[in-house]
Amino acid sequence: MHVNIREPRNRVSRNAIRVWIISEAIQNIIGFAVLGVLFYLDDRFSWKEWIGWILIILLAISIPAAIWSFISPYIQYKSWRYDVDEEYVQLKSGVWQEKHLLIPMTKIQSVETMQGPIMRKYGLYSVSMGTMGSSHVIPALPKEEAVSLRNKIARLAKVKEEDE
Amino acid sequence: MKQARRYHPLIILFGLIQLLRNSAFIALFLFVMKAGSQSFLIVWGRKLFLPFIALAALYVLIDWLSNKYEVDGAHIHLSKGILVRSKRTVPFTKVQNIQRHTSLLHRLFGFTSLTFETGMDGSESSIEFKVISLKEANWLEEAVSAKTKAEVPEVSEKTLHFSPGKKDLIKAAFTSLSFLVLLSLIASIYTKISDFIDLEERGIGFLKGFLDSWQVQAAAIIFFLIISILAGFLRTFIKYGKYEIFSDETRIYIRKGFLEETSFSISKDRVQAIEIRQNMMKRLTGAAEVKLVTAGDVSEGDEKEGVNSLFPFLPVDRAYKIAEEILPAYEILQKMHPLPKKALWASLLKPSWLWILSTAALVYFKPEFLGIEETWLVGSILLFSLIVFVRVAGYTNARYLINGPFIQFKTGIVGTRLFISKRSKIIEAEVTATRWQKLFGLASIQTVNRGKPVQHASVENVPADVASSFYSWYKSRTDEVQIK
């Protein structure tokens, strides 16, 4: 018996996988570089023994994590779904944890599109929505889709409920 | 419509008194305690002190001169600043709740302070009238609250729902462990004084000799106990003695305080949710605290209980009744669904990283406590038992219920929190299922409500089909929501 919620229909851009892999790769390179420096310092200044152990544990965790970071974007891409209609924004995501989110259009306060340097290379935008409580992001949509989605949400979110 | 005007000139006096109060300690430090000091900082501090006070006093005056407010039929306009002038307009409809605080000083002059909370982000979320005459405060409150009501109000009588009797107050005094107050007060005074004087040598040494005989000791202890209990009662009576919960057709009013009076009022349709909390003491004595969750700020200085709290020591049954009385639009059921058995297994069998890592660290370091070699084993077992206790208690206390347009979540380990909200007030709903939960056919449900801070309420490990129906339940909120 599983959670039985109809999945939203729209997917994010397939190029998202590449964007995520590139950014994960950059993070991994930085991470391993820091770890390398620490190992060098540990050896050079002969730090306490337990520090060495912690570094080894960190390395042991980092290697599978690095490998995983090349696989997870595919699963993440597969798991991401969104839907925007006149009444609700529905988001579904999550690799380890399946997450379904339902936000009424009337509760959305702001919407914006954003683009980082890697996303720019692929012409992708993310759309971020703010409610009174928090903000939620649909990552990596092609430019036209992102802009039209942003405008659509902005138009629909103008409606306010009676008691606000 | 009223002309743009300054705040009442009495605000200058209040400002000056506050300035004196804040600088008194610095003055004491500079001129009395360090009177003989020739250190560079102290000498200059003394020279600069008076000019600084003069400047600050001048600022209080200029502040009064440069701040103005204006009220028209539907807005409050505020303007301030000398060099940089700013104007702010707040429509009455954005006011979430209204607070009044009357300090002793206010009472002396027959004035009060009035705050309108808008519940927006940022530092300018409220409009505060620090010193305002009772007449004008009443007029303003009337004007603003009439506009925030959904319908045009008929003149309706206020009904008193609760005011604590002697029995309630005695119970409150015990439940809040108020007799410990004196102890903590003495401890704090002791540490403060001992910063300057060596008490150990002067006072306590003398007392030690005095307390040698056991009769004197016993008498001293009994005397101290009586004083503590009296002090506790006194504090409880001052704090909760004059507590009143009123409501009329459209608004709820909470008034409290014996010496300093605080009152709070909110339109019924602005109540975002109801929260019923019990800590361990309250669970033992069958008391509960009911809070109205509002979008506006409700903190009251450094007090732990906000002004939105109905009497914090209500008997449980009464708490539910009063909540329903003042909010007829709410239905609260005490009987809720417990979590399924498999939720207990899911929670108990889940590997605890905290325990695994701690045990690994303990095994590696093998620390010794009191010379016992097996400290690591004891520590690991203790942590394990604690984790099991937390998980079992979390399972036992958890309850949920979806009842028409209402949802109730109850969670907690030692204390409990029951959160009741309406579908139309919930601003986000979320269903999550981890892979571990999926193995057991479980999921977690979460709601988000407006509030300061934003209110998240959730129950973990409900059956998966409950989670699905929760999702579709929230999706049908459009049936009952009115759109402007």
Image (spheres, grey):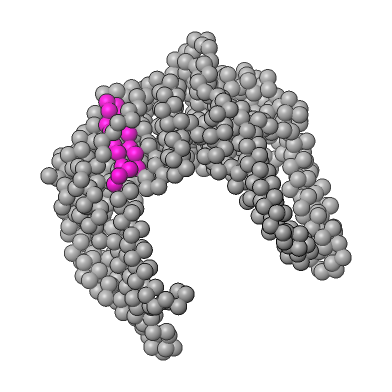
Give x and y (percent) for residue A140.
25, 52
Q: Find residue B158 and report its horizontal and vertical position in percent.
A: 53, 15
Residue B445 highlighted magenta (yes or no): no
Question: Is B407 contained in the magenta span?
Answer: yes
Q: Residue at x 70, y 24 (%)?
A: B133
Q: Is residue B69 above or below residue A90?
A: above
- The image shows residue B361, relative to residue A132, as above or below, that is below
**Span colored in magenta:** B395-411
Up the image or down, B458 lies above or below B425; here it is below
> Quick check: B381 left or right of B33?
left
Quadrant of the snapshot with the C terminus of chain B:
top left
Q: Name the residue at the left extreme.
A: A1
Q: Residue at x 42, y 31 (%)?
A: B316
Image quadrant where residue B227 sits: top right
Image point (40%, 47%), residue name: B414
- As drawn, which residue projects farthest toward the right? B36
Q: Nearer the viewer, residue B64 or A43?
A: A43
Q: Position of residue A49 (x, y in %)?
A: 39, 84
* Whether residue B460 is situated above or below residue A29 in the rendered picture: above
Q: Tell me: B65 left or right of A99.
A: right
* Type of secondary structure dominating the magenta stretch: strand
